Amino acid sequence: MAESSPSSNHRELTDWVERVARTTRPQEVVWCDGSEAERDRLTERMRAEGSLIELDPGRWPGCWLHRSHPTDVARVEHLTYICTPDRQEAGPTNHWMSPKETHEKVGGLFKGCMKGRTMYVVPYLMGPVGSPFSKFGVEVTDSPYVVLSMRIMTRMGRQALDHLGEADEIVYGQHSIGELDPERRFICHLPQERLILSYGSGYGGNALLGKKCFALRLASVMGREQGWMAEHMLIVGVEDPEGEVTYLAAAFPSACGKTNLAMLVPPASQRGWRVWTVGDDIAWIRPGPDGRLWAINPESGFFGVLPGTSEETNPNAMASLRRNAIFTNTALTPDGSPWWEGLGPPPRQAMDWQGRHWTPGRGVKAAHPNSRFTAPASQCPSISPQWEAAQGVPISAFIFGGRRARVAPLVYQALDLEHGIYVGATMASETTAAAAGKVGVTRRDPMAMLPFCGYHMADYWSHWLAMAERGIRFPAIFHVNWFRMNAQGEYLWPGFGENLRVLRWIIGRVKGRAAATESPIGFLPTPGAIDREGLNVPREAWKELLAVDRETWQEELTEHAAFFSRFGRRLPLALRRQHEALNARLNGD
């Protein structure tokens, strides 16, 4: 077995790498340094093997297309496990496996799995270089695609090792694509061991172990132990015409406009306002020396969904992916460009995401619905000057949101902090049925963390409440819903850039200068409190956007109770109290 010289003198780290190599038995071991020369060697190797396709260098400089196995195109939540000694620690919303079974069943799959392959050692840093809040991880993998992607998504290689001190904690990640057999695919998290085992998948969310695995599932456990929070939240700075920037963190389930909000482009009507992107997906949040909560974005890149992304819907995302990006499972046009549904007019012909000939009108999509781009965050035109600040940025408001056709108004503010945590704990999104205006299944996704919390969800809510009780100046909490519909199934709110009008009201509330009226569910904007100049929203639509129907909310309250019943006695008393208080307000008590 050939081995490059270890890039670290950290004995615990090098010993672990040696143990993994003895188990997996690779042909060679390569310690990655994150250099451009290393990137060039890997891309050339993958191009020669046919696993990377170079896009037209004139139109797409430094960009590549990768096609994953047809059975390996998304996160596999049903094969994702939290592995704790006590099953109750994982809670009812996580799949559980004992550490003993994990090491025997999943660890056993790694024996000899890298024969004839290269084992890459990827040291990486989650968080800005030089920040005391950043954390060190290491991933060993037999996938060069993972190495190239981790180079974009994290601070990888030499700069990460330079951050590592002898006493620093390490999060270990062991990954192999294995045989890409869906029956032998597992993503396992062992919080007590600070260990991630991922086998049988090369898809980003399953294989880029710094992302959801470390930055949310393990970090949520670390945050509870150490007094901070790991949240599935974007971070934006909203700058007013006078140059004052207010930072907001927002949690949305999938398909609720998270990336568009993170990279919002103000419409012409909002002259003088600007939105800065700090992060589009994950926030690590800590109390600062001034008593406020401060947040960093632990990632250095974007791993974004492509279908529906265009110059019209998200010009900043389009600018971010124009160079030095890796595209996964898009179509490929004859001129060497990626294409996906929603980008614009379809090409006359293309190769689809599986490399098959494709023409419009065949009834099949050219790009996979979960096709992705991986691009450096530094390339985003709206990237904040503070996005790599060592201390992070101070958060003035938390925003929760979901896709609700009838229930939730456009925006409301929680009555107080405890009520705000209740709002986040009960947030949900709906899937719409084929018939216009009909609503499908409501999925509860508290704080947008349901698939990503590394421990019992009720204990997670208790951690929020405990953080709030520490005398911290906690941000105000709001809920938004861009997706309210009328009886004809038509959206009442234009969304996209116009969402800035809602953010302005939120900031006004934080600053004490925006008007509101109290309702049973929270504070609503008064008529005229949201800037409506130049907005084509009829008066009746405005009324409907901000309406609170007590009967509908009573049905919602029943669903809250059913959801909370899953957590038994571990449900915090504060949330039971908030449920009873909401019921009393809806009944006029």
Image (cartoon, helix red, strand yellow):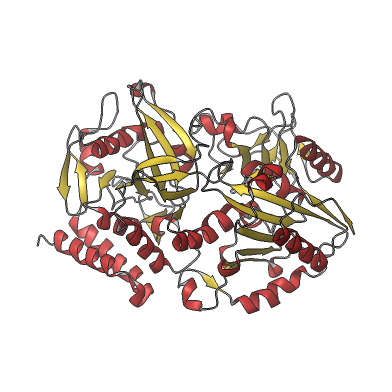
Which residue is depicted at the point 80% across and 68% down? Answer: 23
Q: Is residue 337 left or right of residue 544?
A: right
- Choose top left, top right, bottom left or bottom right for residue 74: bottom right
Where residue 114 sits in the image (x, y, percent)? 82, 62
Q: Is residue 58 left or right of residue 258?
A: right
Which residue is depicted at the point 78% across and 56% down? Answer: 142
Tell me if residue 384 comes above or below residue 167 in the rendering.
above
Q: Is residue 365 left or right of residue 147?
A: left
- Choose top left, top right, bottom left or bottom right for residue 554: bottom left
Q: In the depicted view, which residue is nearer to us: 556 or 476?
A: 476
Tell me if residue 136 comes above or below residue 571 in the rendering.
above
Taking the view exactly as shown, the residue that stands out farthest to the front is: 166
Asked whether residue 263 appears in the rendered view, the answer is no
Which residue is depicted at the point 62% across and 59% down? Answer: 171
Taking the view exactly as shown, the residue that stands out farthest to the right is: 1
Q: In the depicted view, which residue is nearer to us: 580 or 37?
A: 37
Where residue 521 sits in the image (x, y, percent)? 21, 53
Where residue 46 sits in the image (x, y, percent)? 81, 44
Quarter of the picture holding the C terminus: bottom left
- Choose top left, top right, bottom left or bottom right for residue 115: bottom right
The number of numbered discs placed on residues in the rendered structure image is 0
Quarter of the picture holding the N terminus: bottom right
Asked whether residue 22 appears in the rendered view, the answer is yes
Taking the view exactly as shown, the residue that stands out farthest to the left is: 589
Where residue 440 sits in the image (x, y, percent)? 40, 58
